[in-house]
Amino acid sequence: MLFFFVVSFANATFNLTTIPFNAGYSPLFGDANLVRSPDGNGVRLLLDRFTGSGFISSNMYQYGFFSANIKLPSDYTAGVCVAFYTSNGNVFEKTHDELDFEFLGNIAGKPWRFQTNLYGNGSTNRGREERYRLWFDPTKDFHTYSILWTPNNIIFYIDEIPIREVERSEEMGGDYPSKPMSLYATIWDASNWATSGGKYKVNYKYAPFVSEFKDLVLHGCSVDPIQEVSATGACSGIHAELQAQDYATITPMRRRAMRRFRERYMYYSYCYDTLRYPVPPPECVIIPSEKQRFMETGRLRFGGSHRPRRPRRGGRTATPVDENEQVM
């Protein structure tokens, strides 16, 4: 059973070093809705009818490992988006890179869903979305969400279980994120797309919506994005150290855990969306047994409504699937 495998595997540890909030981050917006924890090691981000909130790393990084323990809002959370991601859109507006965890709220009684995505060199028309369910309730306790980004690969982790890997290939070219990025965390009103394609909006009767972040990790080479080229040599030692860490390798046990997670909890994959991509993007590894589970839309063959959604603000595209799609 996957559940047993996940629970037993979660006893592993990456032995991460955390930093206080003020040592690595600063408020991004909605300052009054960003509440630091008494010990200084975490923050609460609030969304109310006036504003959301967010924070950003004080530095930009040329590759790195970014992690946080996150607890999501409970009860009615339709239209709410909580994001934990890296980006350089504030510096490279038209050629930005990005790696996303985006958590999508739901009506009361329905679970949170989430997606991972990546963009390289401004490739917003080539979003690489995958969507999933979770094997736990993310509102009850803190869980660890991590992004590894190296010159060779990208791995998304939940509780030290790899859920997705993207390996760099020559064919990807500039679509592989390679410019320095900052780490962001935000909560905001995404009523126009986040829940059932915008059918269910944020209901501020349930506000404030509170997301909590603690045990923050920033491990990478801090660089000046304007001096990106000259920074490559200066970062070589840190890059080697990063790629030598335990979390930089997907062991056979971890690969089995990742495969089992994806078999049970992934309900949309761009790699199987032949309507968007008649020829799969070069980083896609097409597994015949997995492909059989998906329709040409990239969605599972059974259950749910399949209405497409409109792109959301900022030009970043959203996965064209219905939030309440049943996968079991």
Image (tube, grey):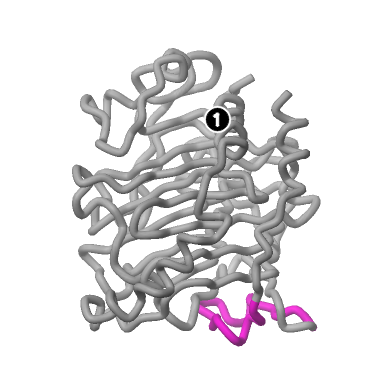
The residue carrying mark 1 is 259
Q: In the image, what residue occupies the spot 57% across and 46% down?
A: 104
Question: Is 21 drawn above or below residue 323 in the view shown?
Answer: below
Question: Is 252 drawn above or below residue 223 in the view shown?
Answer: above
Q: In the image, what residue occupies the spot 36% across and 23% down?
A: 297
Is residue 205 something that shows in the picture?
no
Residue 307: x, y in percent? Answer: 42, 27
Tell me the amino acid under the disc marked 1. Arg
Q: Nearer the viewer, residue 171 or 270?
A: 171
Q: In the image, what residue occupies the spot 28% across and 77% down?
A: 233
Q: Which of 54 and 308 is in front in this view?
A: 54
Residue at the bottom extreme, as displayed:
23
Q: In the image, what residue occupies the spot 48% across and 57% down?
A: 148
For the N terminus, the image quarter is top right
For the C terminus, the image quarter is top right
**Residue 92 occupies which quadrant of the picture?**
bottom left
Is residue 29 something that shows in the picture?
yes
Q: How many marks?
A: 1
Residue 83: x, y in percent? Answer: 53, 58
Chain part drawn in magenta? 19-38
Residue 106: x, y in percent? Answer: 63, 42
Residue 3: x, y in percent? Answer: 74, 31
Question: Is 107 drawn above or below residue 65 in the view shown?
Answer: above
Q: Which of 44 and 97 is in front in this view?
A: 97
281 within the magenta span: no
